[in-house]
Structure formats: C-alpha cells, structure tokens
Amino acid sequence: MSCPYSQDPSGTPGTGPGSAHHTTEHDPEPAPGATAGVRDIEETVRTDFRNEMSYGGYLDLERVLHAQHPHSNPEHHDEMLFIIQHQTSELWLKLVLHELTEARRLMDADDLGKALKCLARVKHIQKILTDQWSVLATLTPREYAQFRGSLGSASGFQSWQYRAVEFILGNKHRGMLKVFESHPEAHSMLARLLEEPTVYDAFLAALARAGYDIPASILHRDFSSPWVLQEELIPVFKKIYESEDTVWSFYQACEDLVDLEDNFQSWRFRHLRTVQRTIGFKRGTGGSSGVDFLKRALDLTFFPELYAVRTEIGN
C-alpha cells in the first residue's frame, strides 16, 4: 500500500507535503544554476593565477610552510607543535618591534595619538602571545623528553627579536650582545638599539616639550644603561594623574604603558609555568638554570615610576 503523502493529488510522486522535494510559498527559490549543498563559484572569482598575484605568492607561503624541519630521528609527532609555536611567536615579535619602533618615531614627532594606536596594537599582540602558551602546555613531559635532545643548545634565550623588544622598552643589558656574536645582523641590530632611546625615553621627551619638568639628566642620559627608578619623575606623573588640565593623550599613554608592562609580565609568568610543567627544574637547553632563571625575570620592570606613583596619588 503506497503512502498517501508520496504523491500530489495529480498522482505525481515525490511532491506531497512529506516529500523531501516538497516546497511551500515560504521556501526560498534556488539561485539559477545552484546545486544543493554547494556554494557555486561566482563567475567573477579569479581562478587562473599564471600571470596574477595569488594569495600564496603574496604571503610567500611556499617558503613559510616549508620552514618547519623537525630534527628528531625518527621524527616525533609533537616536534611540529614545538617548532610552529616558536616560529609564530617570532612572527608576532617582529610585528611588536615594528609597532614599537613606529610608536617611538611618532612620539618624537609629537604625534601621540597615532603612537597610542601602535601601542594598542602591541597590547593585542601580547595577549595572543600569552595565550599561545596554552597550546604548548598540551605537550606532556614525556612527549617533550622524546625530542628535546634534538634541540641541542638551541633556546628561546637566543631570540634576538625578544631581546630587541626588551631593549626598546628599557631592559638593556650590554652583556646580552655576546650571545649574538655569531649572528652579525642580529648583533648589529641589538647594538644599535642598545645605544638608542627607548619608547619610554621618547615619551618623557614629549612630556618635556609639552612643559613638564623632566630633569635634563634624564633626557640626556646614557641610553645604553638599563632603566632604574627615577624618583624625580614621580611628581611629574602625579601631576598628570591628578590634574584636571592633563591632556588626555598623556594620561592615556601612561595607562597604555602600564598595560604593556602588565601584559609582558603575564607573558613571562605563563612562560615560566609552561616550562615548569613540561621540564620541571631541569637546566635549560641554552645552559641557563631553567625555571629559577625565568623567575628572576619577573623582577625586571620597564616603567617603575608609573607603578610607584600609584602610592602617591591622593596623598
């Protein structure tokens, strides 16, 4: 006996209300030439790139996607994660350095609004870099131990871009240059940044040009020296925070710099905890003491006056 809904009243099968092919006045009409379950390629979409710029060509993906070369033998499955994690971090660090360099230039030109846009972008990148540690943390101690020996003496301590970011923010250390003597290009870049003003120096100079009382000894200091707390700056920042007449961009710059340092410390802490859960208290592949060495980095600060002033506000 046939189903009464398998055909319409005229006897045409497959068009009744229970049929898969049944349509109502509310159903959308299929586009001309459309195939069920398929989004047809529009005629204007380009498909021939023999003489045109392609996505892969623009991004140089041929080189990027073939830059992962595991060293374990036999190749360990999880080494690909380890390589990509660090390669992507280096790409983001390249952009961070690009933005901080531009922020410094814009501050020198008293274009603080655009400089703050660069700092805002850096803060978003920092969040990505910090979140990436959760991916690497999926690597168990046993999995990492199975290919860790393939790293030899390679270590994140040797990241010249990370060191460049620290330098342009104020954590300068001339002794670090020795690590990069075998890489002339990196050594040259870091040697240059060591002698140049930091982003913070550029901001202080902008404040001085705006009439704030920044001591000349700070404006003309030895830029290769690591930054240390300058007590004379605390009254300056107290005025910026408390005065109703403060230009908003100066106030915002102070807060953006604090955000930037907070984010940097979050990154350091997540790095520390990821290393600890993966290798415990083993010595680092680059020769450091490992976790204990990373802990000491948490004591470093870029903008100590912007934290110290908080004790004084309202007093």
Image: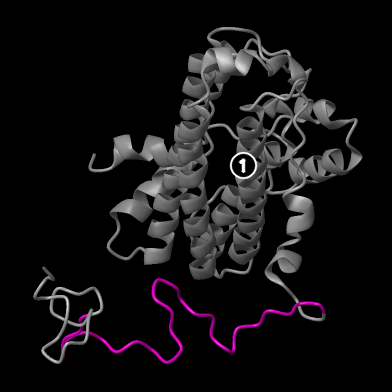
Quadrant where the C terminus sits is top left
**Nearest to the observer: residue 94 or residue 63:** 63
Quadrant where the N terminus sits is bottom left
**Nearest to the observer: residue 93 or residue 81:** 81
**Nearest to the observer: residue 289 or residue 46:** 46
**Nearest to the observer: residue 211 or residue 175:** 175
Mark 1 crowdedness (10 Å alpha carbons): few <14, some 14-19, many ≥20:
many
Three-letter code, disc 1: Ser
218 with respect to 241 (left or right): right
Vertical placement of residue 211 versus 158, above or below: below
- Dot 1 falls on a residue whose secondary structure is helix
Residue at 49% x, 80% y is 40
82 with respect to 270 (left or right): right
Residue 245 seen in render: yes
Residue at 73% x, 13% y is 287
Residue at 65% x, 9% y is 283
- The residue singled out by tag 1 in the image is 89
Residue 265 seen in render: no
Vertical placement of residue 269 versus 8, above or below: above
Residue 268 among magenta residues = no
Residue 20 placed where, x, y %? 24, 73
Residue projecting furthest to the front: 1
Residue 84 placed where, x, y %? 64, 39
210 with respect to 31 (left or right): right
What range is drawn magenta here?
22-50
Residue 47 among magenta residues = yes
Residue at 46% x, 32% y is 134
The secondary structure that most of the magenta stretch takes on is: loop
Residue 17 placed where, x, y %? 13, 78
The image quadrant that residue 37 belongs to is bottom left
Residue 244 placed where, x, y %? 27, 63
The image quadrant that residue 162 belongs to is top right
